[in-house]
Image (cartoon, rainbow, N blue to C red):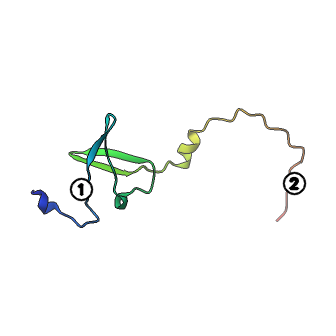
Amino acid sequence: MLRHMLKKGPSSERHVRVFRNGRNQAVRIPREFELPTEDAVMRKEGNRLIIEPAPRKSLRAVLAGLRPLRENFPPISDAPPGPIDL
């Protein structure tokens, strides 16, 4: 299919320049395509590069990545309150 036949509306397509940043190839993301995050996932499908926000980690995944505390807490002299009958 010819490139001029693939034109879309101004908000869904934009010509950008690819450049070198050290040993990496880079592209600036135009403001209207900014992602609402600082973490993203990039994958290649055929000749297309797809960049999308990285999925948020679950609470379980965050907690699993934490290191245990290696700290001795001071004793608490104040006893907890007794049971309350509701």
- Please give the label number shown on residue 81: 2
Q: Residue furthest left?
A: 2
Tell me how far mark 2 sits from mark 1, CA to CA: 67 Å
In this picture, residue 76 sits left or right of residue 14: right
Check the picture and name the quadrant holding the C terminus: bottom right
| Crowding near the residue tagged with mark 2, few <14, some 14–19, many ≥20 C-alpha atoms within 10 Å | few
Where residue 68 sits in the image (x, y, percent)? Answer: 65, 35
- Residue at x 40%, y 56% (from the top left corner): 35
- Please give the label number shown on residue 25: none
Where residue 80 sits in the image (x, y, percent)? Answer: 86, 50
In this picture, residue 71 sits left or right of residue 48: right
| Crowding near the residue tagged with mark 1, few <14, some 14–19, many ≥20 C-alpha atoms within 10 Å | few
Label 1: state its secondary structure. loop
In this picture, residue 9 sits left or right of residue 83: left
Q: Amino acid at mark 1?
A: His
Mark 1, residue position? 15
Q: Amino acid at mark 2?
A: Pro
Q: Is residue 23 above or below residue 76?
A: above
Check the picture and name the quadrant holding the N terminus: bottom left
In this picture, residue 40 sits left or right of residue 4: right
Where residue 77 sits in the image (x, y, percent)? Answer: 90, 44
- Residue at x 71%, y 32% (from the top left corner): 70
Q: Residue furthest bottom?
A: 9
The front one of 74 and 53 is 53
Label 2: state its secondary structure. loop
Q: Is residue 65 above or below residue 8?
A: above
Where residue 40 sits in the image (x, y, percent)? Answer: 40, 48
- Residue at x 24%, y 56% (from the top left corner): 15
Of callouts 2 and 1, which one flags the residue occurring earlier in the amino acid sequence?
A: 1
The front one of 50 and 35 is 35
